[in-house]
Amino acid sequence: VRTWAIVVAAGDGARFGAAKQFATLGGVSVVDRSVTVARDACDGVVVVLPSDAAWMAPDGVLLAVGGATRSDSVRAGLAAVPADVDVVIVHDAARPLASRQLFDRVIRAVAEGADGAVPGLAVSDTLKRVRDDRVVETVARDGLVAVQTPQGFRADVLRAAHRVGAVDTDDAALVEADGGTVVVVEGERRNLKLTLPDDLVLAEALLDGARA
Amino acid sequence: VRTWAIVVAAGDGARFGAAKQFATLGGVSVVDRSVTVARDACDGVVVVLPSDAAWMAPDGVLLAVGGATRSDSVRAGLAAVPADVDVVIVHDAARPLASRQLFDRVIRAVAEGADGAVPGLAVSDTLKRVRDDRVVETVARDGLVAVQTPQGFRADVLRAAHRVGAVDTDDAALVEADGGTVVVVEGERRNLKLTLPDDLVLAEALLDGARA
């Protein structure tokens, strides 16, 4: 199946305190790490950047300019994906430690018939809903998974879900809302999302651990 | 305030594949790491062990034998906590990287008037509910936190919540169900719970990162 990836690197990193996708991790920028694995796993890559970014794209990688919301940015990427592509992967640049194997699992699940496939990890912490620092609910944990990117979709299904102009930080939720079937494949603990500055320390530790 | 900790190390590590509390992390056993920080932060410590464990308790640490459920094990620990203690901390031995500062935050929140206090981290991953590997719901994330241990409680409140013999893997949920007020203090990313064998690799990486 012909597969392209959209690497979303258009955020402003408000919680991180800087544009985290350009932070350096083990001597390589976060976005470069994410693009490298996407290129290995897919036939083509579009990177969606902020309008003011000065990033040097590797040969053959397409660029698109992000919009006001993450969904606008994904749509900007989708517009650059060739019409004959079967499977589209959406990946957050801020998850630079996703493995090639994880991309392959997601692509395979879509190739085998799902409308969408997302990596998920069983939630092992208890979850509570908090209002004004006070617990108001303990959430039932049965069947709960924390989902990651790369997320994969049948190209026509993802285009249809995005055509309505809906806004969600999670592409799978748009496909679900559109009636699509989304399956979960096993995620990776090390595939953390850089959200807070501390996460970069954690990611460095994981990289060092992998090298040792 | 007079504070004791119950370190729960009575699980059989079914998902981990072995008694994870006795695994070695950076040359020191997981349970020894957890007990060391609990002793630093509290006036006394009870460790709840499986009936067949051969663990050498440090001077002054009390031992109790675990029961059939985690709640039974906590009750076994509670029975060994002196009657004049004001605050009881319950901590999973399988979280060996919790810091002294985290224990202090939890104790302070209870000393300042809460019935219970738990460390929580804002959930940054999208959560979905899965049935037969298929997504059936995307869970609203507003106000959701993933909670950790050490959890702290007013001793009388925790004893009352446990007196009814309820069973829950989360002590705060018992206190909430009993009408108690539970507050959330900032948790720690590095305070992961050893659940799967991979988590030990992650914890080693975190330890190495902290040393570097």
Image: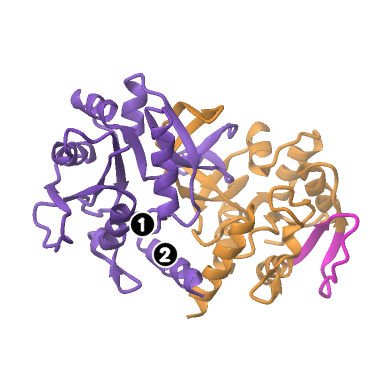
Chain colours: A purple, B orange
Which residue corresponds to the image point at 52% horizontal and 79% vertical from the top-left? B211
Q: Element type at marker 2?
A: helix
Span of residues in magenta = B42-63
From the viewer's perspective, tell me whether residue B98 is left or right of residue A18: right
Residue at the extreme left of the image, as rendered: A52
Based on the picture, tell me whether residue A119 belongs to the magenta stretch: no
Chain letter of mark 2 equals: A
Residue B49: x and y, percent? Answer: 83, 57
Chain letter of mark 1 equals: A
Q: What mark, if any, has residue A194 been given in the picture?
A: 1
Residue type, numbered disc 2: Ala
Based on the picture, tell me whether residue B62 belongs to the magenta stretch: yes
Q: Quadrant of residue B29?
A: bottom right
Q: If the image is split into quadrants, where does the N terminus of chain B sit?
A: bottom right
Instruction: Calculate the distance from the C-alpha at mark 1 to the C-alpha at mark 2.
Output: 8 Å
Which residue corresponds to the image point at 25% horizontal and 27% vertical from the top-left? A156
Which residue corresponds to the image point at 56% horizontal and 60% vertical from the top-left? B191
Q: Quadrant of residue A147?
A: top left
Tell me the chief SS of the magenta region: loop
Residue A66: x and y, percent? Answer: 15, 45
